[in-house]
Amino acid sequence: MNNVWVLILGMAVVTYIPRFLPMLLLSKKEISPSFSRWMTYIPVSIFAALVASDIFFWEGSFNLQPTINIKLIPSVIVFLIAYKTKSLLWSMVVGIGGITCLWFLF
């Protein structure tokens, strides 16, 4: 049981260090406006990469066939709903409903 606590403490330290060190080292430094502006795009690009990899890969391989990769059609519909309504709720409802319907059909 002691090994479990040592493991949990070790994981906590390893997780905490990469978050704490940049704050410690950069807290008193002046960051240029161009770098600060560039940093605002990082969360968007990471989210886009995660979503794209989930949509376009089916069973471990890149697949653009809607008859095989059932995530393609609901993704297009969700994109259109999100663009039209600007509503996260409706996008989620349509996406979950679409993927559920196609999952049971195929």
Image: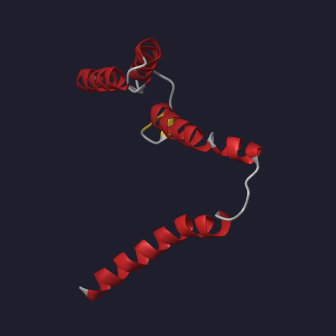
Q: What's the coloring here?
A: secondary structure
Quarter in which the N terminus is drawn = bottom left
Image side of residue 88 versus residue 83, left or right: left
Q: Nearer the viewer, residue 99 or 70?
A: 99
Vertical order, 75 against 29 (above or below)? above
Q: Residue furthest top?
A: 84
Quarter in which the C terminus is drawn = top left
Vertical order, 8 against 43 (above or below)? below
Q: Nearer the viewer, residue 10 or 66?
A: 10
* The quadrant where residue 94 appears: top left
Q: Residue at the location (48% across, 35% down)?
A: 51
Q: Residue furthest bottom?
A: 2
Image side of residue 48 versus residue 2, left or right: right
Q: Residue at the location (69% across, 41% down)?
A: 37
Residue 41 lies, in percent from the top left, at 63, 39
Image side of residue 97 versus residue 10, left or right: left
Q: Nearer the viewer, residue 105 or 92?
A: 92
Q: Residue at the location (42% across, 79% down)?
A: 10
Residue 97 lies, in percent from the top left, at 27, 22
Q: Residue at the location (46% across, 32% down)?
A: 55
* The quadrant where residue 92 appears: top left
Residue 72 lies, in percent from the top left, at 44, 23
Figure label count: 0
Residue 31 lies, in percent from the top left, at 73, 54
* The quadrant where residue 73 appears: top left
Vertical order, 94 against 35 (above or below)? above
